[in-house]
Image (tube, rainbow, N blue to C red):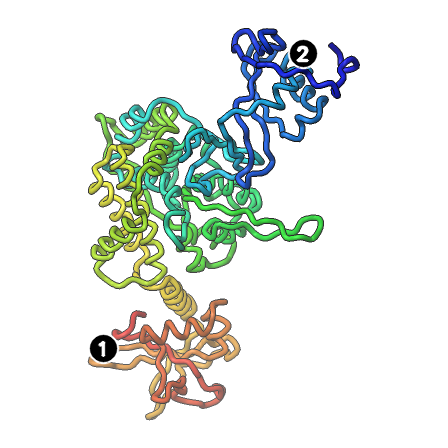
């Protein structure tokens, strides 16, 4: 039957359609085509753009599926062009087949989802699986999803015995597992700020192996892992594609130093930059909520320094450097299993196992999380209180933000143990995570704001490096004068040694112009002064003003307005 001799205005008589997967589609026991079946109705999460999911066998006998929009079912030509190009044998009773496609009303519903992650009704969708809270409802990912590597191989039991069991007793591997699943909890915690966990250390110690372990939670490690070597715009699209899941970025050294600071802010703030379309209308920003695990031979501050800039406190709490190196023999590992001789052999074994078993842990974790009625915020608050008791002292808001992250990782691991996903003992797992936070805090050197540390290190280092630009003040004839004459234009200030409580103390008189232009080094002058004052380093007179230099003899007619004291009572 050809298109020319079909009168579409002539409706076929009503008939009873029956389907046999082997023999085909029948109308009143008359075979009208090969196997074809409307299995579900789909629409987007707003309830519009309805389509029909159609299964059929192609010319090779392989099962295929296509989605045809409802409006297209009114167009005879569009229906059969779609079926024809997908391999369906269209030498059939097309009029009756069109009637079947129009009238079929299957019970199953599919919601088209354009972003990986949680849906409004509390279901979860990703490329390798979907978990629905409603029976007869399923999900279909559509649109420009750039996520790759989501897949499953083996069983959960095999992954737990062959991969997870090797992570027990190893802090870095355990942290990688906890970070790997923590992204699914972020939307359950209000106002939570995420960050990048960057595993640092020299090459060939096992950092990438830790990324493989985390990737095996979701899919094929080699395909799941992404690279830092990308532009900011490209990373926006990639981040959105791993929404509510895990984004792994290997080799921090590959990114341009000038770009890394803005990318860290972007990933931590969970939103891309605003753009206009061709009609000068504001486009919808790309958004995401996810955990990010990274590796690099250097930390974020050193990478930013390559561009000649200094890392800001906001960047350092959005990208947390975790030093991984344990020893030459063990690499990043604390313990080796199964009489393995060294860290390199252990890394090889882990990579082999993660290529054989993957993608089942995340699905199992989400399935139990959705079925449970766990109060995530309550559990988090309880664990955070225990964590504060362990720290035992008041911490700054920046440190508190990082502490929240490690509490999240500990909670994720604890839940995974309760669900039977991880093979660890919950108490031991939490201890491994907390020890890493304490290590980070120790390397940071302070529980205060990072600006304090940065300012103090800079001022101390600047004065030490510019000692030649500072003149010593000496006693002369009952008065004070500089030790020798210097070029005033290059002068930084003066140094006077006083004796306080039997100990020598150095007093630096820094010229105001030199302080603003050189000592502050591009930092906020008011912030630098406040921190120096709070730490007892900047000395003011009884009226709260900068004291004068002890002499004003030529050629130093300009009085020094800032005094920095280096004494035992300060943190200098």
**Residue 297, position as x, y percentages in the image:** 41, 43
**Residue 332, position as x, y percentages in the image:** 31, 39
Spatial CA distance of label 2 from label 1 is: 105 Å
- Who is closer to the viewer here, 345 or 483? 345
- Who is closer to the viewer here, 217 or 106? 106
User: In this figure, which residue is indicated by the disc labeled 1?
Assistant: 503
**Residue 73, position as x, y percentages in the image:** 66, 26
114 vs 268: above or below: above
Callout 2: 10 Å neighbours few (<14), some, many (20+)?
A: some
On the image, which quarter does residue 199 sit in? top left
Q: Secondary structure at mark 1?
A: strand
- Who is closer to the viewer here, 313 or 77? 77
**Residue at image coords 26%, 32%:** 420
**Pair 2/1: label in front:** 2
344 vs 503: above or below: above
On the image, which quarter does residue 251 sit in? top left
Residue 249 appears in the rendering: no
User: In this figure, which residue is indicated by the disc labeled 2?
Assistant: 93
Q: Residue furthest bottom?
A: 478
On the image, which quarter does residue 42 sit in? top right
Compared across the picture, whether 228 is left or right of 424 comes to: right
């Amino acid at each position: 039957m050809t298109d020319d001799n079909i009168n579409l205005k002539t409706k076929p008589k009503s008939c009873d359609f029956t389907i046999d997967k082997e023999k085909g589609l029948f109308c009143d026991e008359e075979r009208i085509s090969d196997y074809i079946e409307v299995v579900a109705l789909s629409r987007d999460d707003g309830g519009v753009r309805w389509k029909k999911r159609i299964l059929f066998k192609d010319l090779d006998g392989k099962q295929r599926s296509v989605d045809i929009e409802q409006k297209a079912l009114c167009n005879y030509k569009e229906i059969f062009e779609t079926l024809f190009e997908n391999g369906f044998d269209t030498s059939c009773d097309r009029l009756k087949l069109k009637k079947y496609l129009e009238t079929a009303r299957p019970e199953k519903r599919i919601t088209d989802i354009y972003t990986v992650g949680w849906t409004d009704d509390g279901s979860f969708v990703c490329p390798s699986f979907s978990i629905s809270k409603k029976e007869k409802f399923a999900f279909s990912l559509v649109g420009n999803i750039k996520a790759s590597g989501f897949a499953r191989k083996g069983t959960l039991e095999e992954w737990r015995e062959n991969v997870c069991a090797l992570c027990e007793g190893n802090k870095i591997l355990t942290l990688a597992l906890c970070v790997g699943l923590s992204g699914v909890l972020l939307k359950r915690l209000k106002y939570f700020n995420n960050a990048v966990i960057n595993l640092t250390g020299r090459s060939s110690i096992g950092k990438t192996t830790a990324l493989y372990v985390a990737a095996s939670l979701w899919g094929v490690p080699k395909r799941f892992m992404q690279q830092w070597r990308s532009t900011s715009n490209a990373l926006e699209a990639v981040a959105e594609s791993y929404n509510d899941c895990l984004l792994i970025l290997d080799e921090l050294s590959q990114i341009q130093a000038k770009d890394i600071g803005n990318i860290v802010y972007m990933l931590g703030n969970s939103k891309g930059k605003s753009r206009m379309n061709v009609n000068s209308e504001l486009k919808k920003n790309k958004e995401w909520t996810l955990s990010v695990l990274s590796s690099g031979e250097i930390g974020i501050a050193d990478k930013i320094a390559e561009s000649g800039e200094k890392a800001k406190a906001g960047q350092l709490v959005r990208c947390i450097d975790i030093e991984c190196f344990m020893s030459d023999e063990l690499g990043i590992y604390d313990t080796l299993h199964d009489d393995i001789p060294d860290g390199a052999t252990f890394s090889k074994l882990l990579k082999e196992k993660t290529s054989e078993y993957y993608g089942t842990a995340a699905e199992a974790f989400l399935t139990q999380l959705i079925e449970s009625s766990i109060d995530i915020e309550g559990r988090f608050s309880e664990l955070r209180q225990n964590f504060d008791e362990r720290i035992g002292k008041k911490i700054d808001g920046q440190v508190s933000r990082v502490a929240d992250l490690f509490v999240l990782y500990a909670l994720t691991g604890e839940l995974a143990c309760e669900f039977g996903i991880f093979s660890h003992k919950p108490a031991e797992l939490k201890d491994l995570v907390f020890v890493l936070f304490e290590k980070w805090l120790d390397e940071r050197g302070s529980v205060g704001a990072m600006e304090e540390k940065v300012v103090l290190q800079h001022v101390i280092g600047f004065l030490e490096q510019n000692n030649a630009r500072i003149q010593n003040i000496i006693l002369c004839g009952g008065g004070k004068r500089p030790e020798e004459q210097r070029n005033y234009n290059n002068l930084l200030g003066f140094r006077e040694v006083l004796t306080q409580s039997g100990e020598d103390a150095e007093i630096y008189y820094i010229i105001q112009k030199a302080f603003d232009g050189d000592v502050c080094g591009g930092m906020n002058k008011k912030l630098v002064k406040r921190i120096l004052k709070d730490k007892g380093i900047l000395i003011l007179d009884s009226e709260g003003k900068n004291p004068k230099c002890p002499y004003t003899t030529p050629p130093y007619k300009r009085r020094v307005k800032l005094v920095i004291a280096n004494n035992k009572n300060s943190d200098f």
